[in-house]
Image (spheres, grey):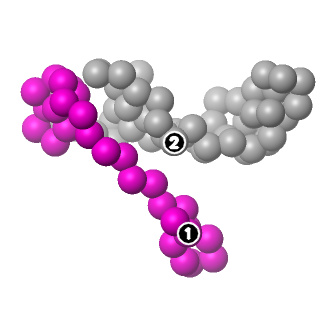
Amino acid sequence: CDANKVCGVHCAEVDLMEANQHAFRSTLHSKFDGAGWTGGFGGGFRDFRRGQYRPNGRCIDTRRPFHVRVHFVEHGMIVK
């Protein structure tokens, strides 16, 4: 199940990484929120500044492998 009812059932979901060489975003969806609350770079989102995430990027050079680490905070504590 997911927030867009893909398999006929709505549920909350977290898209940890939706990315290509020019755009990166993570999106939180509540049960009935298909659009979600998102942050990242590309498609109008600007948590990265232009030039930071791209081929030859100053922060992430998308021509090379990179690692993404995700932490969830629950009741003020980080859940790994």
Q: In which quarter of the image is residue 35?
A: top right
Three-letter amino acid code at the position of disc 2: Leu
Furthest residue in direction front, as rendered: 65
Magenta segment includes 73: yes
Q: Is residue 61 above or below residue 80?
A: above
The residue positioned 52% from the left and 65% from the top of the image is 80
Sequence-wise, the earlier of marks 1 and 2 is 2
- Gap between marks 1 and 2, in whole Å? 15 Å
| Residue 49 in picture, x, y percent from top left | 22, 37
Depth order, front residue of 19/45: 19
**Which secondary structure is most common in the magenta stretch?**
loop
Furthest residue toward bottom: 76
**The residue stretch that appears in magenta:** 54-80
Q: Do the residues labelled 1 and 2 touch (CB within 8 Å)?
A: no
What residue is disc 1 on?
A: 79
The local crowd at label 2, few if under 14, some if 14 to 19, many if 20 or more residues have their Cα within 10 Å, is some
At mark 1, the secondary structure is strand
In the rendered structure, which amino acid carries the disc numbered 1?
Val
Residue that appears at 10% across and 38% down: 58
Q: Where is residue 12 in the image (x, y as percent from the top left)?
A: 75, 44
Q: What element carries label 2?
A: strand
Residue 23, labelled with which disc? Answer: none
Give the quarter of the image for residue 72. bottom right
* 6 magenta-colored: no
Residue beneath label 2, please? 16
